[in-house]
Image (cartoon, rainbow, N blue to C red):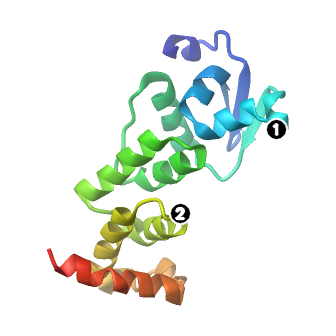
Amino acid sequence: MREYFDVNRFTDVTITCCDRVFKCHRLVLASASQYFDAMFNGSFIESCVNNIVLHDIEVSAFEQILEFMYGGGISIADHNVHDLLRTSSILGLNVVENRCVHYLLERNVPVDDAIEIFKFGYATQKNSLLMLATSAVILEHVDHICRTGAFLQLSVDDLRTILTHRPYLTAK
C-alpha cells in the first residue's frame, strides 16, 4: 500500500491537516485507526465526503502516523513523543500510543514536556505508569519546572496527584 500512497494511486479520501493535504485510502486509515473506522463506518457525514479536515493535530505527528499506517515504522524521539502520544490517542492507534509510553518509561520523560505529558496521562487515565514516570521527572526537576508557565497553570488537584505518587517513586 505504501507505493500506492506515494503516487496517490486509487486514493479515495483527502485529509487536510494544518493546511497540508494528504491523499489517502479509507481502507488503510480505517484498518489502523479506531477514529477513522468509526468515522467511515458510522452515520457521520464524513463517511460520505471525500475531504476530511483534522483539527488540533500537529501536521508532523500526522505525517508520522501516516508513515506508520502505510509502512509500519515510526520514529519516536524526545522532540515528538508528546505530539505522537496525543495524536495516537485522538486517532485511536493503541500500538503507537503504547510505543510512546514505552519510550517514555525507558528513556525518561523530556523535562520540558513533563507537565504536558502528565496532564495528558491524568486527563485520559490511560496509563498510570505514564503518570508515575512524569511525576518522577517533575519531582526530580522541580527547581527548573516550577519556573515554567506550564507549572504555574497546574491545578491544585494536579499538584496533589503529583505529590501523591511520590511514595511509590522513592520506594524503588
Judging depth in this view, the residue of 21 and 106 nearest the camera is 106
Residue 22: image location, x then y, percent: 65, 28
Q: Quadrant of residue 141?
A: bottom left
* Callouts 2 and 1 close, C-beta under 8 Å: no
Q: Quadrant of the C terminus?
A: bottom left
Residue 165: image location, x then y, percent: 32, 80
Report the residue marked by disc 1: 44
Secondary structure of the residue carrying numbered label 1: loop
Residue at (73, 30) in percent of width and height = 41
Residue at (82, 36) in percent of width and height = 43
Is residue 124 visible in this depiction of the protein?
yes
Secondary structure of the residue carrying numbered label 2: helix
Residue 24: image location, x then y, percent: 64, 23
Q: Is residue 102 above or below residue 49?
A: below
Residue 19: image location, x then y, percent: 71, 40
Amino acid type of the residue that numbered disc 2 sits on in the rendered structure: Thr
Q: Residues within 10 Å of mark 2 (few under 14, many from 20)?
A: few
Residue at (50, 77) in percent of width and height = 150
Amino acid type of the residue that numbered disc 1 sits on in the rendered structure: Phe
Report how far apart the C-alphas of labels 2 and 1 lie in the structure: 24 Å
Q: Residue furthest front?
A: 42
Report the residue marked by disc 2: 124
2 vs 141, left or right, is right
Judging depth in this view, the residue of 109 and 60 nearest the camera is 109
Q: Residue furthest left?
A: 172
Query: Which comes before the other along the chain, label 2 or label 1?
Result: 1
Q: Is residue 61 above or below residue 24?
A: below
